[in-house]
Amino acid sequence: MNKPGQQVIGRLRQMILSGELASGQRLAEIPTSEQLGVSRTPVRIAFRTLEQEGLLTKLSGRGYIVRQVTQLEISGSIEVRGVLEGLAARQAAENTLTTEQTEELIALLKQGDALFENGNIDEHDLTQYHDINQRFHQIIIEASQNPAIAEALSRNEHLPFASVNALAFDRNNLKQEYRRFNFAHMQHHAVFDAISKGQGSRAEAIMREHANATLGYAKVFSQMEESGEKMQVINTKNSPTNLTQ
Amino acid sequence: MNKPGQQVIGRLRQMILSGELASGQRLAEIPTSEQLGVSRTPVRIAFRTLEQEGLLTKLSGRGYIVRQVTQLEISGSIEVRGVLEGLAARQAAENTLTTEQTEELIALLKQGDALFENGNIDEHDLTQYHDINQRFHQIIIEASQNPAIAEALSRNEHLPFASVNALAFDRNNLKQEYRRFNFAHMQHHAVFDAISKGQGSRAEAIMREHANATLGYAKVFSQMEESGEKMQVINTKNSPTNLTQ
DNA sequence: TGTCGATATATTGGATCCAATTAAGAAAGA
DNA sequence: TCTTTCTTAATTGGATCCAATATATCGACA
C-alpha cells in the first residue's frame, strides 16, 4: 500500500506513462488538483518530482507540459542504458554471484528456453518473456553491487516512451519476432556464461551489444509509428506507476 | 539571479556540499525553516528535491539526514562517471565537433600546457587547472549531443564528497601532484586527438582510463583521510550550489 | 493596420492552520 | 530487571488563504 503522499505522484506518473496524458499536454496545479480530488500542495510536490524524473517540463508562469521526447533522445537513452548495464555486467562478473543470484538467473534462462523450444511464439509468450527479461537485467544490476548504476538508470527509467520502458513487438510478424526475441535470449545466455566465468570484459561487451539490438529496433519502431502502423506494447507490470503497489 | 523558490534548495545544497551540514546530520522541517527564515513549504519542497538528487536520506517520521556515502559508493560513482563520459567521448567523435567546440578545446589544452611547461606547479596552478579540466569534460558531454548522458550524470554530480566533485591534491607532495595532473592533461590531449580524428572507440577507451586514474586516487585519498592526513580540496566554482548564480 | 502599453487574468510561490502518523518515553506488570 | 503497553511529544502531510509574478488580451496611438 502506498503512502498517501506518494499516491498523487504515482497516479500522475501512471497517467503519463500510459499515454492518458499525451506528450506535450499542458498541466496546471489547480485543474489537476480538482481533477484528482486533492489540494494543490501534493500536486505541487508531484509536479516538482516528476519534473526531476524527466517526465514533465516546466513552462515559466504557465505550469508544466508532459515532456516531449525526440527520437534522438530515445536513441541516446538506450545507449546510456547500454553502457550502464554493460558496466553492471562487468562488475557482476568481477564480484562473483551469490548462490541465490546464480540459481535465479539459471531458472530465468530455463523459463526462457521453454518459451522458445517450440520454434515459434505467440503474444502471450512475449508478455511472459517481458517479465523474465526485466528480472534478468535487474539481478545483474543488483549483482554489480554498485548502487550508482541503479541511480543513474533511474533517470532513464521513466522516459514516456514505450520503446524504452517496455518490449514492443510487431503482432503481424510473429515469425520475425520469434527470431529477434530468441536472439536476445541467446545473448542472455552468453552474458550469464561470461559472468559466471568471471569474464568481465566479455560480459560487458555482450551486454552492450544486447542494448544495441534494442536500439536498432527502437528506430524501426519509431519509423513504423510514423507511417501509422501499430505494434503491441507490453506495459511494465512491476513499474512504480502501479497504483496497487 | 535565482528565483526565490530555488534559493532555499540552493542554500541547503551549498550547506551540504560545503560540509556545513555534516554527513549523517539530521534535518527537520521546522527547525530548518526557522533557521533559514522561511516557512515550511519551501523547505519541504527542498527536502524532496535534495532527496531525489541523492543528498538527503529520508527517515520515516523523523525528517531527513544528510546522506552518508560509503567508500564503495564513491568508487561506484566514479566508474559510472567513467562509462558515461566514455560514451560521450565516443559519440562526440562520431558527431564531428563544431568549430566553436574545437577552438575552445584547443584553447583549454594550450592553457593547460602553459601551466605545466615549467616542470612544476603550485597550488594556484592546480586551482586554475581545476576549472580547465571541468570545462574540458563539459564540452565533450555537450558535443556528444546526447542529453541522456548529462541527465544520468546529474545524479552523481552532487555526491557529498569532495573526491567526486572536485580535484583533490596533496599539498605536501606537489612534485608527485605535478606528475599526476600532467598525466591527466596528456590524457586530455589524447582524447581530443581521438575525437578530432573521428576515432570513437579510442576516444572512449582513453576517457575511461582517465576516469580510472581518478578512481585510484580517490582510494588513496580516502585512506589518507582515515589516517588523519588532510589534503587540499578545490571547490567547484561553477557548481549549481553557488548562491550568486 | 501594426505596434506599443496598460490592465486583467491565470498561475505559481509562500505562510499558516489542522489532521494524521510515527517515534520516544514513562509507567505498570511479569 | 526486563518487557509490554499506553500516553505524550515531535514531525510530517494536506488544505486553504494571501501575495507575487508572468502571460495574454484589449485598447489606444502612430
Image: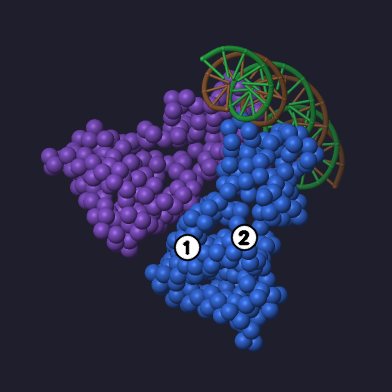
Chain colours: A purple, B blue, C green, D brown
Q: Return the chain for callout 1.
A: B
How many angstroms separate mark 1 from mark 2 (CA)? 17 Å
Kind of element beneath mark 1: helix
Q: Work out whether residue B70 or residue A6 is closer to the camera in this orientation and state it.
A: B70
Disc 1 residue type (three-letter): Gly
Location of the C terminus of chain A (image quadrant): top left
**Drawn side of residue A29 relative to residue B76, left or right:** right
Q: Nearer the viewer, residue A156 or B125?
A: B125
Question: Is A81 positioned to the left or the right of B98 in the image?
Answer: left
Amino acid residing under circle 2: Ala
Q: In terms of secondary structure, where does tag 2 sit?
A: helix
Can residue A21 be seen?
A: no
Query: Seen in the image, is A157 located left or right of residue A124?
Result: right
Relative to B129, is A9 above or below?
A: above
Q: Residue at x 37, y 33 (%)?
A: A237
Image position of D13 with respect to D4: above or below: below
Residue under label 1: B82
The image position of residue A146, as x and y in percent, is 44, 52
Marks 1/2 same chain: yes
Picture quadrant where residue B231 is located: bottom right
Q: Which mark is residue B162?
A: 2
Residue at left 42%, top 35%?
A: A239
Residue at 45% of width from left, 67% of height from top? B208
Which one is in front, A183 or A151?
A: A151
Neighbor class of circle 2 (other Cα within 10 Å; few <14, some 14-19, many 20+) is many
Label 1 or label 2, whichever lies nearer to me, is: 2
Q: Is residue A79 above or below residue A102?
A: below
